[in-house]
Image: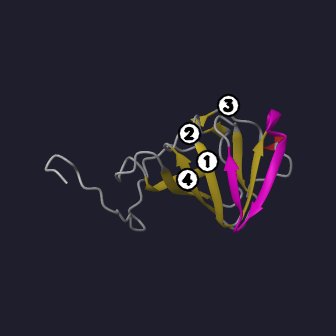
Amino acid sequence: MSDTETRIVPIVTREGHEYTDTAQSGGAIRVSGVSIQHTPATRIWFGKVTNEPGYRSLPHHHGEAETGGYVLEGKARIYFGEHYSEFLDMETGDFVFVPPFMPHIEVNMSTTEKLVWLTTRTPDNIVVNLDDVEDASLDGYRRA
């Protein structure tokens, strides 16, 4: 390695030291463990998203980013499609893929337990918030 090259080594982000100044969308609180903001990563965002009981995100999409999610804890629903009339339910241990530019809403279906996702995106945590919708328009959703 020459003197002008930078050596990149593994980086550990300790619990409680995640990057918290990341894009948010309502009740979905995102923190990153691996991102361009605090590691040498340049083509991936990897973080944790938490929805308190009965809370949901605002309608949003992730621009050009492909998104992979894993339900670490809880019961989740993702609304999508015209007027958010379609949905998929997930629970602990389930993975989900959300395509680029797809408007969706992430929901904690429990009114007593929190929902925790592990989420990864390429190239970064792109969050484009959209106009909100009434809770009543989301089939089966209720706030805590």
Q: Which residue is mark 2?
A: 127
Marked residue nearer the N-terminal end (4 or 2):
4
Q: CA distance from mark 1 to mark 2?
A: 11 Å
Look at the numbered discs 1 and 3 and tell me whether their residues touch, using CB distance below 8 Å.
no
In the image, residue 100 above or below residue 96: above
**Residue contact between numbered discs 1 and 2, judged by CB atoms under 8 Å:** no
The earlier-in-sequence mark between 1 and 3 is 1
- 3D distance between C-alphas at marks 3 and 4: 24 Å
Give the label, 4 or 2, closer to the camera.
Answer: 4
Numbered disc in front, either 3 or 4? 4
Q: Secondary structure at mark 1?
A: strand
Q: Does residue 55 show up?
A: no
Mark 1: amino acid: Thr
Front of the two marks 2 and 3 = 2
Instruction: Count neighbours of disc 2 (C-alpha within 10 A) and say few if under 14, some if 14 to 19, many if 20 or more.
Output: some
Q: Which residues are magenta?
A: 81-98
Upstream in sequence: badge 1 or badge 2? 1
Question: In the rendered structure, which amino acid carries the disc numbered 2?
Answer: Val
Secondary structure category for the residue under label 2: loop
- Check contact, mark 1 vs mark 4: CB within 8 A: yes
Residue 27 in the image: x percent, y percent? 62, 50
| Numbered tag placed on residue 67 in the rendering | 1
Question: Disc 3 marks which residue?
Answer: 131
Tell me the quarter of the picture where residue 111 sits: bottom right
Asked if residue 18 lies left or right of residue 83, the reply is: left
- The residue where tag 4 is placed is 120
